Image: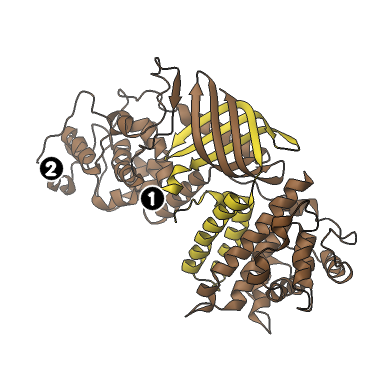
Chain colours: A brown, B yellow
Amino acid sequence: MAGSTTTTSGVYVQVIEDVISKVRDEFVGNGGPGEGILHELQGLWEMKMMQAGAILGPIDRSSAMKPTPGGPITPVHDLNVPYEGPEEYETPTADLLFPPTPLQTPIQTPLPGMGQTPLPGTAQTPLPGTADSSLYNIPTGGTPITPNDYPAVHDSGGETKAGRPSQYMPPPSPWLNQRPPLDVNVAYVEGREEVDRGASHQPTTQDFFTMSSGKRKREDFAQYRAGGYIPQQDGAGDPIPDELKVELLLPPLSMFLYTSVWGHTSSSRPDEVGLQVAQGANAPHHTGPAHQTRVPSRIPQVDGPIPDPYDDALSTPNIYNYQGVVNEDYNVVNTPAPNDLQAATPGLIAQNDIVDDDDDEPLNENDDDDELDDVDQGEELNTQHLVLAQFDKVTRTKSRWKCTLKDGIMHINNKDILFNKATGEFDF
Amino acid sequence: MATFELYRRSTIGMCLTETLDEMVSNGVLSPELAIQVLVQFDKSMTEALESQVKSKVSIKGHLHTYRFCDNVWTFILQGAIFKNEENQENVGRVKIVACDSKLLTQ
């Protein structure tokens, strides 16, 4: 494992240096924050990587702590000591692109600063002297380097010139390596955050999000619509004002929850949904002025199955109707543009809120949600193992799945492993 | 050049994102510049994986969940076995997220 870990670390170091060198123009150029901030960025990034165990700390640190620019080759060479057959790494371009001098500042600066004020609470107090030192105090609240590390750091820099892990340097504390579990369902979290954010000034959004049963309490709306507008409690539904629809725009990845639930009566245009709903709304007690002005001139379909654009548009494997061919290839790119889906979503959600669908319950309404929740909980409990890659091909024969992946990053058993190609064979 | 934001969820990408978040919230970095850095990371990481990584891996396991949405495959495996040239890793549960490689070449 040492070999692949080292390679991963080496690639990471090169990626960092590549990124830093290629954004340098933006930092140094017109109006940019300057070279110092770029160094800070690199220093923080590398420090986090070392804490995560993704970069072999002693190597980078020893090169970063070199006090004199006398050895631009030495630190680079250090990086490659553990490699076997490292011809391609012997003369990395990073040597030319990134001389070791800039490395000094970012690493050295934060360590003393953090040692003095390790508490994150002191973040907002600017320290006398350079602005840099105060900057470092702020972000490292989660995983600061403990003061105990400082002597070791300097020892490794001063006494050991080789890039091998210094015997004087204790390995990082286990908790330093314990990164918070990566949330692989980032999209959902972000979606929730979006909703929460929207809810702060438009709480109705929140209401839609939790409204899956079609039942709601009157008080829910009373607090939202204090302006005198009494929302519909039964019947087919009201059209909703435009500003509400705007609020209903959700991130694309969270929307499939709704599409799965409401897809059977979905319409691809928000307006159509609103109009369609308004057509069926006959209960007089909840028709407001807003509704009168929005009476549709066009009569939409109110009964019978409405063609579902999602059924055709989404190329999700049609497993359940699957009967004929033995092999299927899922690699055809015919998923609609995200914009289309996003445009359709608000209408669907609006319908969700408005239609009282007790006797029109969609099939499989809550199926996948529960499953997703289970997965989420399981992943939060366990160490997160994650593979990020590109797929070349995914095929299925009966319950046997085969896929070819490439250019992947795996985070498995707390190790990062890179691969150029991967083949997967799964039984469903 | 088209890139994926996929790799931002890797260790190196998360570390960069956290760093940028901190620097932006501290006011030393503009959000626009932070985005530029992230985009550059997308490119650099993709290039590095293409040019510097040669290893091959085989993955086997029980497919617990599969999902294909917006051209992204998601697999959740149970009892997965990862093998590369020199060693093997066993994982109780692993998630695979894969973007369509053809989208990069288009």
Please state which of residues A274 and A358 is positioned toward the viewer in this rendering. Answer: A274
Please state which of residues A293 and B28 is positioned toward the viewer in this rendering. Answer: B28
**Percent position of residue A331, x then y:** 43, 34
Q: Is residue B58 visible?
A: yes
**Percent position of residue A173, x then y:** 81, 54
Quadrant location of the N terminus of chain A? top right
First in sequence, mark 2 or 1: give its number.
1
Residue A406 vs residue A361: left or right? right
Instruction: Tell me if residue A178 comes above or below residue A160 in the rendering.
Output: above
Which residue is outermost to the left? A297
- The residue sitting at 54% across, 78% down in the picture is A28
Residue A295 vs residue A371: left or right? left
Q: Chain of mark 2?
A: A
Q: Secondary structure at mark 2?
A: loop
Q: Is residue A121 visible?
A: no
Quarter location, residue A304: top left
**Percent position of residue A159, x then y:** 89, 69
- The residue sitting at 45% across, 17% down in the picture is A326
Are the residues under marks 2 and 1 on the same chain? yes
Residues packed near mark 1 inside 10 Å, few (<14), some (14 to 19) or many (20 plus): some
Quadrant location of the C terminus of chain A? top right
Instruction: Tell me the number on the disc at residue A203.
Output: 1
User: Where is mark 2, residue-wise?
Assistant: A295
- Identify residue type, mark 1: Pro
